[in-house]
Every structure is written in structure tokens, then in C-alpha cells.
Image: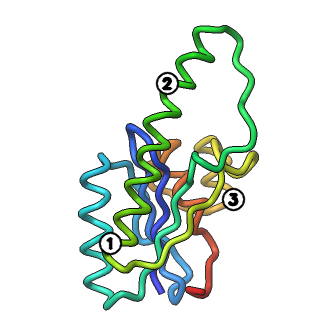
Amino acid sequence: MIYIGIDCGDHTGFAVWDSEAYAFTRIETLKIWQALAEAYKINAAHNGKVKIVFEDARQRKWIPKETSESDYRGKLMGAGSVKRDSKIWEEFCTDNHIPFEADPPRPGLTKWNAKYWADVIGWKGRTSEHARDAALLVWGRKDIR
């Protein structure tokens, strides 16, 4: 089975986990339209044996502390676009009959720095924070249901 992890946002984290090989085949950052196109191609290439897991900001139950009101307002504005991206992924998966999970943001399982990431995961390629967050959504999965 192939799992595609998506970290929604201006810079869409995109990770592909092959559960049979028990390894990542891709971890990168794309524009949303590129990520949608790649997910569509991967699903077609694997005869529908794909599951998309995206971080769904609509389910956020906690708000990170900010040091200033302007930082807080900036986060709120960005949250609106990320929520819209979550809706786009849900519609994309539903319309294309691709199984999906819309996972809430999980404190502690995001924003790992590159060194810690490489030490724990073992991926030696270059990654962005968004790509690492996407990968953490699907890392270690073994089944599709």
C-alpha cells in the first residue's frame, strides 16, 4: 500500500510511504496544484491502492502561544487558508474515490528540526519543515484500513 502524507499550507508538504518496502519514496515540498496532480498520478499508477492522510486544520483543538498580537493575527490569517486547503484535499479525495484520513494537528508530532528528523527517521535527503510534517503523518504505516 502507498500512503501519501500532506501538510497543508502555502508550501504543501508531500510524502510518499510504501508500506510493503517500509520506506519513504518521496519527501518534498510542492505547490498545492502540484501535490494534487502528483497524488492523482500515484493513485492511478497503484490501481487505487493509495490512502491520503492530510493534516486537517479544521480539527485544531489548541492554539500555539505567540509573543505578540501581530504574530497572533498573522497565524489566524494563515489558518484560514490552511483550513481551505484541508477542504480542497477532502473534496479531491472524495471526488476521485481515494480513501483518506483527515487528522487533527498533533502537538509533538510536527515541527521536528532537520537533525532530530534525520536521527529518528533515517532519511538523509534534504527536507523542509512542511515535508517532514507530511512524512510524520504516514511514517510506519502498514495497512490501508
Q: Which amino acid does the dot numbered 1 rest on?
A: Asp
Residue 19: percent from left, percent from top: 54, 84
Q: Which amino acid does the dot numbered 2 rest on?
A: Met
Reply above or below: 61 against 101: above
Seen from the viewer's position, the closer of residues 6 and 136 is 6
* Label 1: few (<14), some (14–19) or many (≥20) C-alpha neighbours in 10 Å: few
Label whose residue precedes the other's in the sequence (3 or 2)? 2
Q: Which amino acid does the dot numbered 3 rest on?
A: Val
- Badge nearest the viewer, 3 or 2: 2
**Label for residue 120?**
3
**Label for residue 95?**
1
Reply above or below: 84 against 39: above
Marks 3 and 2 sit apart, C-alpha to C-alpha, by: 33 Å
Q: Is residue 129 left or right of residue 72?
A: left
Marks 1 and 3 sit apart, C-alpha to C-alpha, by: 36 Å
- Mark 2 lies on residue: 77
